[in-house]
Amino acid sequence: MQPPKGWDEAALLSTLPKDISINLQPADDGLWMADITGVPGVSAYGCTMEDAQAMVLDTLHEIMLARRDLAAARCRQAGRSPARATAKAAAGD
């Protein structure tokens, strides 16, 4: 999925915590569970620790894309382009 034309990806990434910490722990069913500290609702399971880590990062990516799309839709509903809204937010307006 490509970001909308003119979208500032740095503005999206700036909403993430600066130090992302992934918690990994074995689940009772033999799988591994991963979640990201400071980002509620981002968790995933995998067959191995590596799989769980990759899956939770993919989950985070998908959530950020969904939030970006929601923000862009709200901008369009308000009659603004996402690029103008991002520039205004960066300027502190």
Image: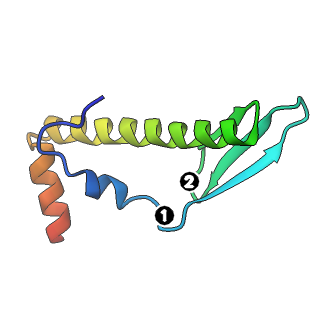
Neighbor class of circle 1 (other Cα within 10 Å; few <14, some 14-19, many 20+) is few
Q: Along the horizontal axis of the image, is 41 left or right of 84?
A: right
Q: Amino acid at mark 2?
A: Val
Q: Amino acid at mark 1?
A: Pro
Give the quarter of the figure containing the N terminus: top left
Report helix, strand or loop for mark 1: loop
- Residue at 19% of width from left, 66% of height from top? 90
Q: Can you identify the residue that label 2 sits on?
A: 39
Q: Can you identify the residue that label 1 sits on?
A: 17
Residue 10 position in % (x across, y down): 27, 57
- Residue at 76% of width from left, 30% of height from top? 47
Residue 41 position in % (x across, y down): 60, 43
Residue 37 position in % (x across, y down): 63, 58
Report helix, strand or loop for mark 2: loop
**Looking at the picture, does residue 60 appear above or below residue 89?**
above
Residue 64 position in % (x across, y down): 41, 43
Does the image show residue 93? no
Question: Do the residues under discs 2 and 1 have CB atoms within 8 angstroms?
Answer: yes
Front-most of residues 55 and 91: 55
Quarter of the figure with residue 73? top left
- Residue at 31% of width from left, 37% of height from top? 70
Front-most of residues 66 and 23: 23
Question: Which comes sooner in the sequence, label 2 or label 1?
Answer: 1
